[in-house]
Amino acid sequence: MYFKNPEQDGNELQERNTDGFDNTMEALLPTLHQQRTYDYVLVADKVEDQDHPKFLKQVAFIDHLRKKNMKVTKIVHDDKVFYGVRAPKEIFDKYRYLLKVSDACNWSGDRKCVIIPHSTRIRVVHYILHHTHINTGENLEELQKKGVFEATFCLHERNKQKVLKQKWARWSALCTTQPVDDVRSYFGEKVALYYLWLGWYTILLVPAAILGVIVFLYALAFFNTSPLIKEVCESDTVMCPRCDKWCQVWQLRDTCTYAKVSHLFDNEGTVAFAMFMAVWATIFLELWKRHKATFVSKWKVFDWCEEEEELILGVVNDPDFHPKEFRHSYLRSTLVLVLVTLMLVLIIGLTQALVVFRVVAAVQLSEGTWEFVRDHANTVAVMLGAVLHYFTMQVMTRVNKAVAFKLCEIEKTQSFAATERSFTVKMFTFQFFTLFSSLIYVAFFLGRINGRPGSYVRISGKWRLEECHPSGCLTDLFIQMAVIMLLKQTLNNIFEFTVPWFKSYFRRTTTKRLERKCGHCYKNACREEEKRGHDPCDICKLRDWLRNYDLNDVNSFSLFNEFLEMVVQFSFTTIFVAAFPLAPLLALINNIFEIRLDAIKMVSLERRLVPKKTNDIGIWTKVLEAIGVLAVIANGLVIGVSSDFIPRLVYRYHYGPCANGEADVHCMKGYINDTLSTAHITDLSVRNDFFPSQLITESGFNVTQCSYKDYRNDVDYSLTSQFWLIMAVRFAFVVLFEHVVVIFKFIAAWFVPDSPMLVKNNRLKDKFSRLKEELQDMKCSQSTDV
């Protein structure tokens, strides 16, 4: 880099580049500040050998840009070469005209703008840069992969950036309203709709969180008066060992604390709350559609089509452009389907590996030296499994992303928007199975396939399958969800903010050195030049470019990562909420901080995202609708199959004291004993499952029988008629629950229109005025011809 001599007047450099690039550009630029900004910056390594392939490809790419009348400023700094790219006015004139004559995009406000918004300039130039090919057929993306260019980015606008920091991207604005219109003006509609959706989701979480807390407090109010808890805490029943070798028989009252915890999440209130959350998911989506319609109508993108804009940009970039035709290959579709299936099998296989880990860990922990860990080996194993599941998720997220990208390449989609939709569906499917396979096992299989004393199911004939906690299977599901949600939200937010902050902090030193070198020139002379409508000196341009270069990189899928994180959280909040009523509260607290964290990261720590125009959150709406349906199914199964709600109901009205006409006795008295079956140690098969030392109580007595949770005959261990009655009622409840909730969902969807009447009427008036305007233009042109 060559810098200005302080003794010389003006802003001329002592020495200039001589390879054909104009560094002054002053004579070629309009005086409007809006038109003096650079649309894009390319960064490459400095190559001394002018015959080197990298240098030749750099020059070739820049020459192709200049043939398209793009203005390029080259500045060399140390071992880097910076190219500032600015598009001419005629490119945007073509873009505006094609918007006007298009089918779907002619409603956009851009077609009438006197000065093209900088966000639109960036979007158009971004497309041109990434669809410019050199003679070898390589485009910018391929040149970056080969190291010809190191980085490409659009520049932050310092004044608007400062306004966003003051209004929005700071922690002190935690509880203030989001300036969505300002975000849209700076980052484009796509980013603005993400924050609009996230803000709306957070607001709608408030009633869900309040009701979840009420359900929790309701259970807490009857914490010590529940007859079920009292029966467990006062029981003298001797229970069978929970594991092999080191586990001994134990007293049911030992699980008094866990019974109380289970009651907090397995009570009558959770049934009503699960129904509420299933309907809430539908109401949230319908209200979101109305909320979104208000803004996209105001932004004039109600009918916007991303595929059609790609077509327009293709024509603007190259008049001889030929659009990629729609194609469908059954061979490719079959191949993708097979590969997706294999990937899901791998993910489910990892879930089974986690099950094996928990089984083996429970055995090893029960043989440990720490008494507390040994006594609570199963619970500790479940928690360790949840932690391991979290780290497995982090690894598989990267694997899933790579596989989803590869599958999209195999599909050969017609446009970037189609590629984005395809990638979103595949990535979410992989992530869903990665996150929820373990929870599905805990919710619906844990403790139901492990056998009974004398006939336990074992892995490789050695390790006994794990059982549900004696207080109920819902306790294990609650522990798993709580650990994953807390770890995922807390650690993700910590890493999401601190890693970009540290990267940005350590990369600022170069800019600060240059700022000191620029010194007085930037603060006085250059600012005066800017006020008069002239370019700043090269040092000050470079200072601004380096400030952006030192920020963390972004790409086309950076916003996708934020959406995926929130949609996964939405899944946790709705799908298994019956087991964890406090999930909406945790999600609400997380989202309040997530909005500001993402804003600070996007405005201050990352390079500027390419502003994209859209009128919806895209395929994510369909994904959210699918989650709403899954929430109905999952919560119905959790209540009907996993919880003890149905067994308690059957006991109350068919087997309990009230069903037998006993007065002055609580209807649930004797329920705990009714759920237990007895194994006789005299039975050879039972005796062979345990060591003699396991059948000795803490007081030193040998037991002749022990109890376990199941509905079995004490003689031949066959399932009792009560088991089959409960099973029938369980499935009847699931069917009834799902039908009732689905009916409520349909009613809610019908009752709430997608667009407010005000929006529809405003659009009607706008269409009418446009028709009159076109008719007036036609009359004017006819009179001119006459």
Image (cartoon, rainbow, N blue to C red):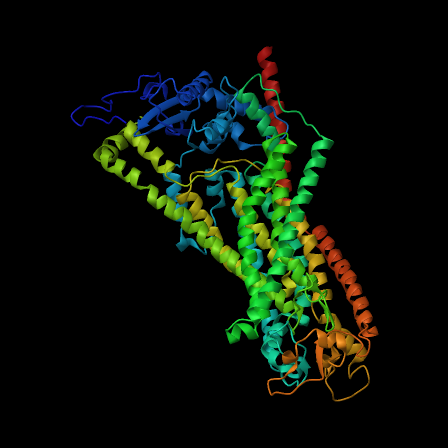
Q: Is residue 507 shown above or below 312?
A: below
Find the residue positioned furthest to the left.
Answer: 7
Q: Is residue 436 shown above or below 525?
A: below
Question: For the point 68% across and 71% down, which residue is it?
Answer: 268
Q: Nearer the viewer, residue 59 or 369?
A: 369
Q: Is residue 761 shown above or below 48?
A: below
* Side of 138 where 14 appears, left or right: left
Q: What x and y, as percent, mark residue 46?
A: 35, 26
Q: What x and y, as percent, mark residue 365?
A: 55, 69
Q: What x and y, as percent, mark residue 745?
A: 71, 55
Q: Is residue 581 visible?
A: no
Q: Quadrant of the C terminus?
A: top right
Question: For the point 42% across and 28% down, which residue is it?
Answer: 149
The image quarter containing residue 465 is bottom right
Q: Is residue 678 visible?
A: yes
Tally of numbered tags: 0
Q: Quadrant of the N terminus?
A: top left
Q: Nearer the viewer, residue 738 or 61?
A: 61
* Side of 3 where 124 appears, left or right: right
